[in-house]
Amino acid sequence: MAGILQDKVALITGGASGIGRATAVAMAREGARVAVSDLSKDGLEATVAMINAQGGQSIAIAGDVTAEADVANMVARTISAFGRIDCAFNNAGVAPRSVGPAGQRTHELSQSSVATMLSVNLMGVFLCLKHEIGHMLARGGGGAIVNTSSIAGLIGLATSAHYVAAKHGVIGLTKSAAIEYAQDGIRVNCINPGYIQTPMTKETMEARFDEIMAKVPMRRLGIPQEIAEAVVWMCSEKASFMTGASHVVDGGYSAA
Ligand code: NAP
């Protein structure tokens, strides 16, 4: 039986690890040819090897989502390898502890850590949208894009003001683009994961697992595959009336 992304071409950022890798593998399983991008070359090659081992087609494109030339190159190389882009998952991101000391309240954050956070988690999504949509319009419209926000895009979180601001911003970009391109057949949505077991959350979970799990009705971390399945569906024709939406997958965190 054909997969729900049969004959589609997908571009994924942050695909060397965690949620991006799981989504690349799931998209390939559903029949998509997948261009996987990330900063990390080694992790990228491992994702591509996983996809090729299951009989899929995939290429690795190293690049930094904060550099417009790199983003333009990701789009151009995907088109040159596979002919087009139908689906995009703009997912690369960093956690607060990657851009400065952990545990800082708003008045303690440095301008440079806030700038780095916004550059990767918000500007990076903007640059990807800009170049992906430019291509989709140039080939006559149609496409589905999912941006990675977070439950932090919907609520405040102490000691994460810059992360929260960036993830709220991703929802704003998503809604605006959804309105602008609806008549071009381009759907733009975002996924809002709760706490997921990836390298990004490893240190936080080592330090605060019990405290955080007390707030999750399911009392466990999600796994990357549980986000991937939702993203695959959102990129597929099965989600044909969904645009401008924020889709929460969080074990009940934001319902509590
Ligand atoms: P992850 O395993 O750390 O994956 C993120 C990937 O993005 C890494 O491979 C990272 O590369 C890459 N990346 C970072 N900066 C980049 C840049 N400038 N250009 C290109 N790639 C870059 O984390 P994850 O948990 O899968 O996170 C994926 C997305 O989900 C992020 O946007 C994150 O904010 C979001 N999210 C995660 C959770 C969670 O609980 N895990 C919850 C809500 C939302 P390096 O490792 O080389 O830096």
Image: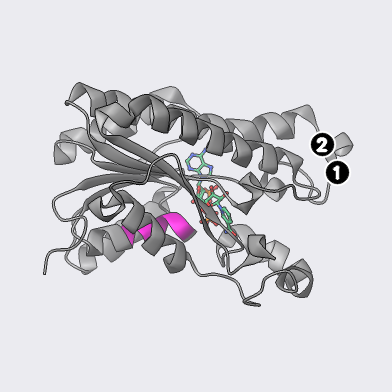
The amino acid type, in three-letter code, at marker 2 is Leu
* 61 lies above or below 193: above
Q: In the image, is 182 to the left or to the right of 142?
A: right
Under circle 2, the secondary element is: loop
| Disc ID at residue 109 | 2
Q: In the image, is 122 to the left or to the right of 241?
A: right
Inspect this view and state whether residue 161 appears.
yes
Q: Residues within 10 Å of mark 2 (few under 14, many from 20)?
A: some
- For the stretch drawn in magenta, what is the main secondary structure? helix
The amino acid type, in three-letter code, at marker 1 is Arg
Residue located 60% across and 46% down the image: 94
| Disc ID at residue 105 | 1
* 65 lies above or below 24: above
Inspect this view and state whether residue 65 appears.
no
Residue located 40% across and 48% down the image: 41
Identify the image quadrant of residue 254: bottom right
* 213 lies above or below 83: below
Magenta part of the protein: which range?
A: 19-25
Residue located 33% across and 38% down the image: 187
Residue located 82% across and 51% down the image: 103
Q: Nearer the viewer, residue 254 or 66?
A: 254
Q: Position of residue 239 (x, y in %)?
A: 31, 52
